[in-house]
């Protein structure tokens, strides 16, 4: 069993508050990802959990016990960093077994644990090598092995894949997911990469400027972002955001005037908005269809042809361009007029403060 709670957790460096009251539950065996832009406080929060940064307000509970003052070595957690931080003069086996040696674990047990971890990580044939004779991916696996041998209650990862090239990153992502299943372990994983968050997480925590914007499963966040920040952060290419004016509010939803004419009625609750308000309509590139009867007409000004799919940038007015994801086989040429359609059920509306209007059932 390993669970963890943060209650109103704060971190200040002198007068500068960088973590501004975090409430979070991490369940046993959950894979939780902290995601957010650079500088939002992800590493700080992880280091507070690890005990590498003092918590200046609020509580950290591990398995139901307050752990704020517990020494890092006593918390039962193991952290893997972006910089692998391996000892260059030690072999893979010595690197992986180092913490156990320091803890006075007998040689035979130590060797068994290192062998078992090496097996899981497919490092068994490399145990006698030194870090300089390993690839980046292998080094990162050794760093992960060093965490595994300690049999921690919770694994903490801080951007462990950021130093790897793109292809290897995808590979290691899959390996970590497999590892999570094999070890049945609780893991907290920090990344700035929303694709890593979406593909790996059971639960995503979106952080921004030291606070939580939203917590949810990947599809929760994708389908029901609570505000513009989350809507823009989750999903690739990014959600299109259009300035629109509210025309009518009724039991069926909110009608808004679209750029270049026409209206669309989005099935959401009006909340506190009023007719005449300037608000934001969000629609994802994959939810815009080329459709002769659609609400928009425009001209393709850029095409990113990725093979399996194509991303068009379509100018619908002099200063509004929509990003549209379509089939790779689509042969629409540049600068030819096209019409685009959106389904109101796929639209999001955000009030002037950026808060999402809730969907009608
Ligand atoms: P992330 O990991 O999300 O990129 P960090 O947790 O490293 O962000 O940093 C969060 C914020 O805390 C940043 O604005 C950073 O400048 C600030 N910060 C980190 N360490 C210190 C420190 N020792 N003193 C003052 N500010 C710090
Ligand atoms: Mg960081």
Image: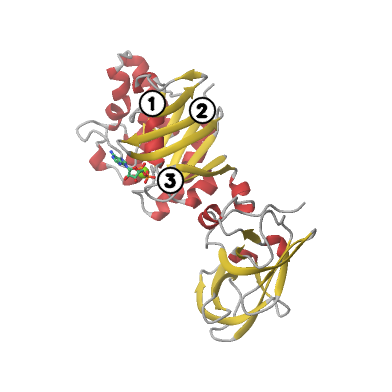
Q: Percent from the top left, x then y, of residue 345?
A: 72, 61
**Mark 3 near mark 2, Cβ–Cβ under 8 Å?**
no
Disc on the earlier residue, 3 or 2: 2
Residue 140 place in picture, x, y as percent: 35, 40
Nearest to the observer: residue 209 or residue 189: 209
Neighbour class for label 2 at 10 Å: few (<14), some, many (≥20)? many
Q: Which residue is mark 3?
A: 191
Q: Nearer the viewer, residue 90 or 52?
A: 52
Residue 88: x and y in percent read 21, 35
**Residue at 55% in and 29% down:** 29
Give the residue drawn at x 23%, y 33%: 87
Identify residue for label 2. 5
Which residue in the protein does label 1 denote? 115
Q: Determine whether, in the image, residue 250 is placed left or right of residue 97.
A: right
Tell me how far mark 3 sits from mark 2, CA to CA.
Answer: 20 Å
> In the image, 66: left or right of 142?
right
């Amino acid at each position: 069993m390993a669970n963890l709670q943060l209650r109103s957790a704060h971190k200040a460096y002198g007068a500068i508050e960088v973590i501004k009251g975090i409430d979070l539950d991490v369940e046993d065996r959950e894979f939780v990802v902290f995601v957010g832009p650079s500088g939002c406080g992800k590493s700080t929060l992880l280091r507070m959990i690890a005990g590498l940064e003092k918590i200046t307000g609020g509580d950290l509970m591990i398995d139901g016990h307050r752990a704020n003052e517990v020494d890092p070595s006593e918390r039962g957690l193991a952290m893997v960093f972006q910089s692998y931080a391996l000892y260059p003069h030690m072999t893979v086996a010595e690197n992986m077994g180092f913490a156990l040696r320091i803890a006075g674990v007998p040689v035979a047990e130590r060797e068994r644990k290192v062998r078992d971890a090496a097996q899981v990580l497919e490092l068994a044939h490399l145990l006698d090598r030194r870090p300089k004779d390993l690839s980046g991916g292998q080094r990162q696996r050794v760093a992960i092995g060093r965490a595994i041998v300690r049999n921690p209650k919770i694994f903490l990862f801080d951007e462990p894949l950021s130093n790897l090239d793109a292809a290897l990153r995808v590979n290691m992502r899959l390996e970590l997911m497999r590892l999570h299943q094999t070890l049945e372990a609780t893991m907290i994983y920090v990344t700035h990469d929303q694709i890593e968050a979406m593909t790996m997480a059971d639960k995503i925590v979106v952080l921004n400027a030291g606070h939580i914007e939203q917590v949810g499963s990947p599809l929760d966040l994708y389908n029901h972002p609570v505000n513009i920040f989350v809507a823009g952060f989750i999903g690739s290419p990014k959600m299109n955001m259009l300035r629109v004016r509210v025309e009518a509010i009724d039991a069926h939803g909110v009608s808004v005037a679209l750029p270049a004419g026409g209206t669309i009625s989005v099935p959401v609750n009006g909340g506190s908005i009023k007719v005449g308000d300037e608000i934001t309509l969000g629609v994802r590139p994959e939810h815009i269809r080329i459709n002769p009867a659609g609400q928009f007409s425009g001209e393709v000004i850029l095409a990113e042809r990725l093979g399996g799919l194509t991303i068009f940038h379509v100018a619908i007015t002099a200063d509004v361009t929509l990003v549209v994801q379509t089939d790779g086989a689509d042969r629409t040429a540049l600068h030819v007029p096209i019409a685009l359609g959106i389904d109101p059920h796929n639209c999001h509306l955000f009030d002037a403060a950026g808060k999402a209007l809730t969907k009608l059932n």
